[in-house]
Amino acid sequence: MRRKDIIIGVAIFGAFVITVFFLVTWSHGISIGVTNSSNGNGDQKKASSIAGLNCDNAGRRPIAVMLESDPEGRPLAGIGQADIVVEMPVTPDGITRFMAVYQCQDPKEIGAIRSARQDFIPLADGFEAIYAHWGGEHGALAELDSHVMDNINGLQFDGTVFYRKPNIAPPHNGFSNLDLLTEQAKKFNYGLTDVFAGYPHTTDHPIRNLSNIADTISVDYPSPNNVTWTYDPLNNVYLRNRGGTAEIDKNTNRQVSASVIAVMNTTDHILTKGDQYIVVSTTGQGSAEIYQDGIGVQGTWKKDPLKLDAKLYFYDSAGKEIQFTPGQIWVEVNPTWKQ
């Protein structure tokens, strides 16, 4: 009788543990699944250095492409297929620009492609990426023309590597794709193998509680570039809205989502009095908020100002590098608007 009682007790306890685990998982919106790490030939896929995703192109050198945020250019092609996207204001009135960095996926088209900005160059080089842009402001072009980093300028390859769509008004009609950019990189003898140190990733999901729940993230760029990210617990991602409407990728016709949102607080100033551009500090250090798994944490960002290709780091409040949930990352650069 005693042995039977023990067996029954163990069975009851096991059922209790499973029930509690299910309830906690359900209440925290965490989906559980198995990642297929095979490429179909029995070979194991490698995790990509930026997004931590198992993909065939994980060893490919990232290509960073400048994209516009103007309403005339929406929806953007390929914006939802990048491994990491950096969004940053570039003018005093808060017009933003994107740098979409591609490694795993192969969007059929990328655009509208726009000009380079100095503030993005250290970030692009920090990802050890090839920087693709269509022209640029004077300071950025001076740097790139001095070969501070590998880059491909659309002004030199208009109609070949880069092309314009006749049914879209300029300057919102510039496009390319990774095949065209990669072929030109080969002609320039640029390295095509990934050497980025990478970000640490984890599949361990922290417990959500009243002190850390972050179901909505607002980035107060001036309208129509104001951004809201809303947590989708079923898929464990944040869904992007801009100017009050869903951000759609033109290639997929799906709403843009990200597993990680990093808000990078920094400073900015107008380049010269009356200038139409601002300079945003993207090296040094500052405070940051990191959102993933429906949870927000306070931390810091750091990038060595003396080394252009230094990695952009994100640390928690204890000074430990943050481990990201595998998936697409968005960095929202949030300056304090020094006029």
Image: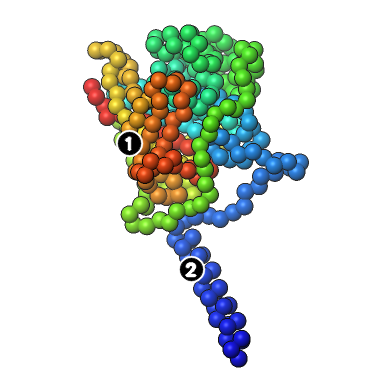
Label 1 sits on a secondary structure element that is strand
**Is any atom of residue 226 visible in this view?**
no
Residue at 43% x, 33% y is: 313
Q: Which residue is mark 2?
A: 20
Q: Amino acid at mark 1?
A: Ser
Where is residue 331 shown, x and y percent of the image? Answer: 42, 34
Where is residue 212 shown, x and y percent of the image? Answer: 35, 52
Residue at 38% x, 34% y is: 301
> How was the colour assigned to the protein in this rendering?
rainbow
On screen, residue 298 versus residue 82, left or right, reads: left
On screen, residue 67 versus residue 218, left or right, reads: right
Q: Amino acid at mark 2?
A: Val
Where is residue 311 shown, x and y percent of the image? Answer: 46, 29
Label 2 sits on a secondary structure element that is helix
Which mark's residue is nearer the viewer, 1 or 2?
A: 1
Where is residue 172 shown, x and y percent of the image? Answer: 46, 20
Seen from the viewer's position, the closer of residues 234 and 76 is: 234
Residue at 57% x, 10% y is: 157
In this view, which residue lies farthest toward the right? 41
**The disc label shown at residue 101, or none:** none
- Residue 171 lies in quadrant: top left
Q: Which residue is mark 1?
A: 287
> Which quadrant of the figure contains the N terminus?
bottom right
